[in-house]
């Protein structure tokens, strides 16, 4: 069987192209979609993510402000900044880059982002709306996975999807989406984690696998059935003696699934490019809601 590589770039490009006229028509009435990113400390990977996000907003002629805070900042100081951003009418989306330093309780901070500007979709109100089937902001990575499935016309309804990983930002919202009774959901969903006794017994029965564990090369060819569609969310740095000192690999051992799976997303170049694109989508959606509010006055 030829295994199709589900590249994220064409999906991402088509979504960004569709956003351009929407941004333009907002501009015509004086609204420029704007993201405020808050980053605490100097984690190198987080710095790269925030820089890439800022560049993507610039390319779409949207605005983004990055608020860089010292590692030893207090919770109160972060909450004061979030309060200012929540009340700034020019800001349509707020994101707090994770992970936060250990002295900051991430729940307290994420809960302080206004649900109306929570473009990451991590606020409990937005997670609750997602579970209810009435989403406000869908978390960007699971949203991007859904868009990949849609673009490549991978059937979901009636199939058995196995998600490996149950984090609040990937695994759980992915479950809420795939199990939902709607066009891109309606799957029978199994969710696995470190408490799962025999992971292969579940992945072997899957029609779709969503690997989001952060465990390099964990899913191998002998754990899957022929014709499965695999979405590899994992991004793991594996140290080696290459020039960079590491190689990025997914949670799926790609070589071993080729020829068995119907399709698989590459790492890098699969889900990765989608996450920032869905952040753009959520921010433009938020700015458009703001336009509706203006129209009501
Ligand atoms: P977390 O560490 O928050 O969660 C990992 C989940 O996987 C946990 O539920 C954990 O189980 C489970 N898990 C870990 N190891 C195993 C294992 N060996 N067998 C079964 N389950 C396991 O990670 P995230 O959800 O934040 O991220 C997951 C991966 O996705 C990472 O590689 C991350 O870098 C990547 N990622 C990629 C993004 C992208 O844009 N492509 C965006 C976000 C994340 P338990 O709950 O029991 O601990």
Image (cartoon, grey):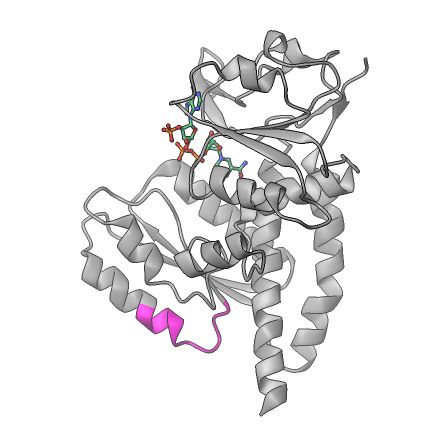
- Would residue 32 be visible to someone looking at this image? no
* Range of residues picked out in magenta: 83-92
Q: Residue at x 71, y 13 (%)?
A: 258
Task: From the viewer's side, name the closer residue of 189 and 79.
Answer: 189
Quarter where residue 154 is shown: top right
Magenta stretch contains residue 255: no
Q: In this view, does 131 lie above or below 227?
A: below
Residue 10 relative to residue 33: left or right:
right
Residue 27 relative to residue 191: left or right:
right
- Secondary structure mostly seen in magenta is loop
Where does the image place residue 245, in percent across and percent down from the top left?
A: 44, 18
Q: Which residue is drawn at 26% across and 60% down?
A: 78
* Quadrant location, ligand no. 1: top left
- How many numbered markers are drawn? 0
Q: Which residue is drawn at 18% across and 56% down?
A: 74
Task: From the viewer's side, name the closer residue of 84 and 69.
Answer: 84
Residue 70 relative to residue 10: left or right:
left
Question: The C terminus appears in which quarter of the rendering?
Answer: bottom right
Question: The N terminus appears in which quarter of the rendering?
Answer: top right
Magenta stretch contains residue 84: yes
Where does the image place residue 178, in percent across and percent down from the top left?
A: 62, 41
Quarter where residue 194 is shown: top left
Q: Is residue 183 above or below residue 255?
A: below
Where does the image place residue 195, in percent across and percent down from the top left?
A: 38, 23
Q: Residue at x 24, y 51 (%)?
A: 70
Where does the image place residue 171, in percent across and percent down from the top left?
A: 49, 37
Q: In this view, does 203 lie above or below 41?
A: above
- Would residue 195 be visible to someone looking at this image? yes
Task: From the viewer's side, name the closer residue of 232 and 188.
Answer: 188
């Amino acid at each position: 069987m030829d295994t199709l590589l589900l590249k994220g770039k064409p999906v991402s490009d088509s979504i960004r192209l569709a956003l351009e006229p929407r941004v333009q028509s907002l501009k015509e009435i004086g609204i420029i979609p704007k993201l405020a990113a808050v980053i605490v400390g100097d984690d190198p990977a987080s710095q790269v993510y925030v820089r890439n996000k800022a560049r993507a907003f610039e390319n779409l002629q949207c605005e983004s402000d990055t608020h860089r805070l010292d590692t030893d900042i207090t919770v109160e100081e972060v909450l004061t900044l979030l309060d200012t951003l929540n009340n700034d009418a020019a800001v349509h989306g707020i994101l707090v880059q994770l992970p936060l330093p250990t002295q900051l309780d991430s729940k307290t901070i994420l809960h302080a982002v206004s649900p109306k500007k929570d473009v990451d979709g991590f606020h409990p109100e937005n997670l609750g709306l997602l579970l209810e089937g009435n989403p406000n902001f869908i978390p960007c990575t699971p949203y991007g996975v859904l868009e990949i499935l849609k673009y490549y016309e991978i059937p979901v309804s009636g199939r058995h999807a196995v998600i490996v990983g149950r984090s609040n930002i990937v695994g759980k919202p992915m479950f809420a989406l795939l199990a939902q009774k709607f066009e891109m959901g309606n799957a029978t969903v199994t969710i696995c984690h470190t408490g799962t006794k025999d992971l292969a017994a579940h992945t072997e029965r899957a029609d779709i696998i969503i690997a989001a564990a952060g465990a390099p090369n964990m899913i191998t060819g002998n754990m899957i059935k022929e014709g499965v569609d695999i979405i590899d969310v994992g991004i793991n740095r594996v140290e080696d003696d290459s020039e960079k000192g590491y190689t990025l690999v997914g949670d799926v051992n790609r070589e071993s699934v080729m020829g068995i799976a119907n399709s698989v997303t590459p790492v890098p170049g699969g889900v990765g490019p989608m996450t920032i694109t869905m952040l753009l989508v959520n921010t433009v959606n938020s700015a458009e809601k703001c336009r509706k509010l203006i129209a009501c006055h």
